[in-house]
Image (cartoon, rainbow, N blue to C red):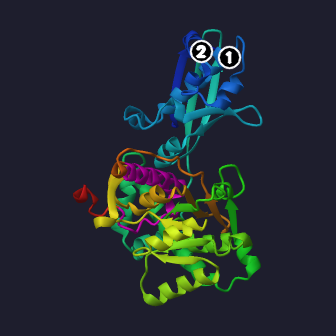
Amino acid sequence: MSSEAPAAPAGEHCGIDTIEIARVARLVEANDEAALARLFSARELADAGEGPGRAASLAARFAAKEACLKLFPRETALETIAAADFAVERDAYGAPQVVPSPVAETVMGRYRIARIALSMSHDATRASAVAVGERAVLEVPAIGRFIYRFLPFRREVVLENLRRVYGGRIGEAEIVRIAQAHYAHLARLLGEFLRFRWLSPAARKALVRVENLDEPGGLWETHARGKGVLILTGHFGNWEVATIAGVQKYPEAYGRFHFVRRAIKPRWLEALVTRRFVRAGFGVLPKRGSLDALCGRLEAGDLVVFPFDQHARGRDAVVVDFFGHPAGTFRSLAIIAQATGAPIMPASSWRETDGTHVLRFERPLEPIANEDPRDEVAAVTRACNAALERLVVRHPEQWWWVHRRWKGAAEQR
């Protein structure tokens, strides 16, 4: 293979790195598998094989990891991400592909990078890699541009929130495009909400695809632990339509899901939404004064859905970072998990381009223990916010940007 580093494509967001194979060979010789696992994934170590080519293969992967880090100099300098956050694996055709960690996925999303393409090479002495960040493409319907210009409901709030998340990473024009796409999403949200009651049961089932139910680490495996499940979510996609239609596809789930909800205005809309949930077999728990009932549902092995992306204040709140900015966040979810041992499983929904919806359950969060219960609550709450960050940037136009998520949090800290 050529020892010359591949050329970087013109005009692209690129990172390039070259490393001496002998350096990696010394690293391999001086460390056991457990130590190497802190830098390379189990799949990477297995793909590298054994024998004389192992060091060269790992060197190429190490160069690729370093090239990925060079795409994000700010986060690398702040140690938000490290080389281990980018695994380099082969796809079914043998081509290298980057598998980002959850933290790296969030960082990529804030730069609107959908995937990282790799080019790797090595000769007898050196390994080189080029990482190219491929930008996500966002279509903006005309209705979104129209609402943004002529019916700008909370436009300054939307733009301020977007700048908190994306400022300094993407241009102002792209931030405006996300805002316009968000208004188009809100228009579709309203239309879907009004049409939903007239859909047949078959049409509702066809409307939603549910992901990660039966897979290892999925919802049913997590539920089988016998401590109930706290489902961490937010205002993603059409959360009510996707949840009702998605869960209704599984008769065994009837009566086992309970939603923690804050009453909305006007009252007729609150009554309509509550009636839909109850008819679909979901329990509804008020956000205030339902702690005993909520713990009782978990003890019975039920699943409690907890929207977690709204501003909290006063005794209900702990101030932790959300996208790097202090945000008043509900501490009750962490306290309940602490008291009951129930696992916390993130979940989100989004609309596909064909108008169907996806309801996806992520792997449960890793347990966090701390000798100081207050520190533990803060750490678990921050972990919940970090999980939501990844879900927000996955489909940013479909999150609830009109909400003042960071309202007054700096003064509370």
Q: Quadrant of the N terminus?
A: top right
Dot 1 surroundings within 10 Å: few (below 14), some, or many (20 or more)? some
Q: Position of residue 339 (x, y in %)?
A: 46, 58
Q: Residue at x 55, y 70 (%)?
A: 297
Q: Nearer the viewer, residue 9 or 153?
A: 153
Q: Position of residue 268 (x, y in %)?
A: 48, 90
Q: Which residue is mark 2?
A: 28
Kind of residue indicated by mark 1: Arg
- Whether 394 is among the magenta residues is yes
Q: Is residue 376 left or right of residue 253?
A: left
The magenta segment is: 376-405
Q: Is residue 401 visible?
A: yes
Q: CA distance from mark 1 to mark 2?
A: 9 Å
Q: Position of residue 97 (x, y in %)?
A: 65, 35
**Main SS type for the magenta part?**
helix
Q: Nearer the viewer, residue 365 or 56?
A: 365
- Whether 256 is among the magenta residues is no
Give the mark count. Answer: 2
411 lies above or below 277: above
Q: Position of residue 55 (x, y in %)?
A: 64, 15
116 lies above or below 151: above
Q: Which residue is mark 1?
A: 54
Q: Name the residue furthest bottom.
A: 268
Q: Nearer the viewer, residue 363 or 148?
A: 363
Q: Quadrant of the C terminus?
A: bottom left
Q: Residue at x 28, y 66 (%)?
A: 314
Kind of residue indicated by mark 2: Val
Give the number of the mark in front: 1 or 2.
2
Dot 2 surroundings within 10 Å: few (below 14), some, or many (20 or more)? some
For residue 383, the mark is none
Q: Name the residue furthest left.
A: 411
